[in-house]
Amino acid sequence: MKFEGQAIRLTPLDNGCVELNFDLQGESVNKFGQTVFKDLAEVLDLLESAKDVKGVLVTSAKSVFFVGADINEFGPIFAKGEEAIIEGVSSVNKLFSRFEDLPFPSVVAINGYALGGGLEFCLACDYRVMSTAAKIGLPETKLGIIPGWGGTVRLSRVAGVDVAVEWIAGGTENRPDAALKAGVVDGIVEPENLRDAALKVLADAVAGDLEITQRRAKKKGPLKHNDIESLLAFESSKAFVKAKAGRNYPAPIAAIESMQHGAKLGRDEAIPVETKLFAKMALTSVAESLIGLFQSDQLLGKKAKNWEKQSDKKVEHAAVLGAGIMGGGIAYQSAYRGVPIKMKDIAAAGVELGLKEATKLLAKRVDRGRMTNLEMGQVLSRIDGTLSYDNFDDVDVVVEAVVENPKVKRAVLAEVEDKISTDAILCSNTSTISISYLGEALKRPENFCGMHFFNPVHAMPLVEVIRGAKTSDRAIARTVAYANALGKKAIVVNDCPGFLVNRVLFPYFAGFAMLLRDGADFQQVDKVMERWGWPMGPAYLMDVVGIDTGVHAESVMAEGFPDRMAKTFKAASDILFESGRLGQKSDLGFYAYKEDKKGKPQKVMAEDTYELLKPHCAERKEFSDEEIIARMMVPMATELARCLEEGVVSSAAEADMALIYGLGFPPFRGGVFRWIDSIGIQAFIDMAAPLADLGLVYVPTDGMKALAAKNAKYYNQTQGA
């Protein structure tokens, strides 16, 4: 028996069994889509009619088993509505159940990632053998949906409700040892032994040495819980998950409800319950946003890879100028990701502080069991703390991270340029200062660009790579390649005051400043914006960023865009700064900060803040949530639109992802442009209209008005931006 399709090969084995090998042509990975389903239907016709097949071994020709479904096929199906979604999902479920019901045993060899539909297919197999290099999971809730191809039904029966809730609600990728302990797989072996081990399990199953009948009966029958056990298990899980996921992410609760409603049913009755809940989640705005983010993230990755391919060389040695917290964070990230780095400072105390920061971050990994002491030592050995420029001629990329002062930066950049090779790339980690201006001090400005990290470096995924007036493609390519090596999300933007993220952040802060000026309570504003989805409100965010940093950046932005960002009043941040209240770094800003038992700063109310601000603010008054949201978000949105229209950023997708990765913009809203699309561009313009007297940051751009005139969106139905 043989079959050769576009996604599946079926070949006979010596022992009377057959091998079903997934190998989607034209793709680097296997992913479920119409091509795979067409082949699978034909293969099932052959296997169901075969009279001499004893068992089936399932393998992958790719380096992974399955990354899941082809998400790009979701959009057109979801756009057709609930009935179309149910029909499409049901057709796949019938295929998986047909495979599960074959009259002979099946064993799958999981050689790499088996995620989403990939794991759901594995659960339809009788036995699962996993490589120690693989990971498995059901991450659908991270996309705002739930497993739809039997995941909630089969996993809860294979491994129990607790495991199913943890894996599905958390959307985690799980390592082999955890999968074996949870009972999701039956064995784990080294990659080179995987095929032989899976063949041995299949041979034992064919010989009758392994129980198949009871195993299948368990998967196809109801869960073995009485009513009280069921109630306790599911209701306690829902309470815990709801508290953790929050009200803006309904999918984890829907996944638990799928298990709960299907608990007393057999497989064939429980799967339609799951399907109906899947369709309900698929039609939510949260799913639309999160799936859109996934697609945008793929776009970012593709663009970054394309830049890396253009790089003239691999970054093998790096350097950072200026140690301290930021320099130490960059050094840690580089060394941890395997790129040796020199960390230079003008003072021994600075080098010591940088090494202390890197050591602290590594020690945390050791404490959490994510790294051994030996591995920690190996990473630290890749950081060369120094006070000199010795051997800087071997460095491929230098990141300047000294104090945010134009004169100091220009002097340091000019100095280091004479110490490095003529083809080395020089970058500045400035957050606001013009790259073109800094490049004027250099002999080779074509080898210079911005590389803006966000603090804390190890935790924040975004890196802005900024093109100056004379920056070459070669400089951008090598810098993006270095960002990729550090595991960061690189977005290339053009030079302007504040670049992209800070340029749109400060109109948001300006909206906050005007609210306080007009009598708003900063605590109420924080609470409203946190309920809207931000991880922290604007007052708390300013404290974390640093009031002094904010005041400095505001002055840069006001100079760059005086018509929109110059202040005509004394802002709350100015008052706090003049009082020496710098935020978390001084334990006092809008809030006061005290360390908890773990040494982390926790905010508490500082009553004197109101007295300090009172002389410069109108009498306190209540603002509605809608007013606060409009006054905070319109300035950010209009400025982001200007950035897109001016070509500072090349697409709406990249602009949205920059704010999500750089600022923590609420993911369930999909980004500023997806949020505008969701409410409608005309509705946004109507929201802004009553606020026009507050300044130009509240006036929609010509591009926005043109979109509204055409009733258009920033994104099309599937992705395009």
Image (cartoon, rainbow, N blue to C red):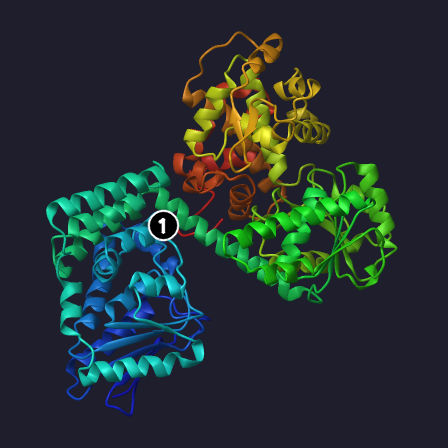
- Number of marks in the image? 1
Q: Where is residue 419 in the image (x, y as percent from the top left)?
A: 86, 56
Q: Is residue 126 above or below residue 237?
A: below
Image coords of residue 712 (percent x, y): 44, 41
Give whichever of 7, 137 is nearer the camera: 137
Residue holding disc 1: 170
Task: Residue 69: tell me if it is visible.
Answer: no
In terms of image quadrants, where is residue 713? top left
Q: Which residue is drawn at 59% across and 51% down?
A: 363
Q: Which residue lies furthest to the bottom in this view?
A: 14
Residues packed near mark 1 inside 10 Å, few (<14), some (14 to 19) or many (20 plus): some
Confirm whether residue 294 shows in the render: yes
In what element is the residue under mark 1? Answer: helix
Q: Quadrant of residue 347?
A: top right
Q: Mark 1 belongs to which amino acid?
A: Gly
Is 633 situated left or right of 390 in this image? left
| Closer to the camera in the image, 203 or 442 | 203
In the depicted structure, whether residue 11 falls above or below residue 510:
below
Q: Which of 696 and 18 is in front in this view?
A: 18
Q: In the image, is 232 to the left or to the right of 522?
A: left
Residue 108: horizontal and vertical position, in percent?
Answer: 31, 74
Q: Please give left or right for residue 486 compared with residue 427 in the image.
A: left
Q: In this view, does 500 lie above or below 172?
A: above
Residue 368 screen position, x and y as percent: 50, 52
